[in-house]
Amino acid sequence: MPTWAIVVLVIIVLIILWAIGVQNSLVKKKMLAENAFADIDVQLVKRYDLIPNIVNTVKGYAKHEKETLEGVINARNKAVNAQGVNDKIDADNQVTQAISRLFALTESYPELKSNMNFLNLQSDLKSVEAELAGARKYYNAAARNYNYAIRVIPACIVAKLFHHKDMEMFKAEEEQRKNVKVEF
């Protein structure tokens, strides 16, 4: 075999080995991001389990606030049944907004704010929300690393070859970005 053929063969083998290495790296980054999203799912399940208890506690005090309470339950049910990352992110944002409206409603009921069961549930929910915020932050970092890896040259060539797509990030909704109005 001529020398030039050996050189070409070595170059082809190196390119294949490089492509395999890049693909393995991209798969690892994607799996880390998917695992991070699974951690969010665990926290969301905890959150969704707390919501009916909170709603039932509030129901006893705020019977005529049916629309708000039904909105919370509907958002929760939609979130529980959401499939895929994008749907779960959208549903999670709706639940967050519904819970905010529920807690704003509780401000009108001083006797509810002193109910130990409600206070315990509220504390549990705050704890889950804190864990959820941490899990979202970790997921966003993992998704960012993956998204970056599939966009940079020369890895983007392998990413396109193996159909890697950007992963969705958790972002604040427009309603969450608005300034909170505090009135005395």
Image (cartoon, grey):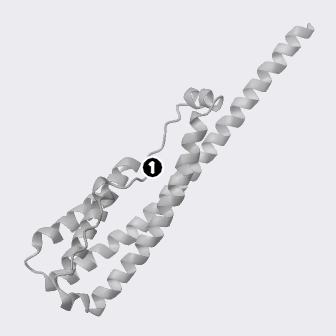
Q: Is residue 132 left or right of residue 91?
A: right
Provide residue 61's location: percent of width, then percent of height: 15, 85
Tag 1: residue type? Answer: Met
Provide residue 162's location: percent of width, then percent of height: 57, 30
Q: What residue is at 58 percent from the left and 32 percent from the top?
A: 159
Total count of labels: 1
| Vertical arrangement, residue 94 with respect to residue 154, above or below | below
Report which quarter residue 113 is drawn in: bottom left
The furthest residue to the left? 64
Q: What residue is at 57 percent from the left and 40 percent from the top?
A: 148
| Vertical arrangement, residue 40 with respect to residue 1, above or below | below
Report which quarter residue 97 is drawn in: bottom left
Label 1: how many Cα within 10 Å (few below 14, some 14–19, many 20+):
some
Residue 45 visible to the viewer: yes
Q: What residue is at 37 percent from the left and 82 percent from the top?
A: 123
Q: What residue is at 64 percent from the left and 32 percent from the top?
A: 155
Assign the N terminus to one quadrant of the image. top right
Residue 81 visible to the viewer: no
Provide residue 25's location: percent of width, then percent of height: 66, 42
Q: Which residue is mark 1?
A: 169
Secondary structure state at the residue bearing disc 1: loop
Provide residue 163's location: percent of width, then percent of height: 52, 31
Q: Is residue 147 left or right of residue 81?
A: right
Report which quarter residue 20 is drawn in: top right
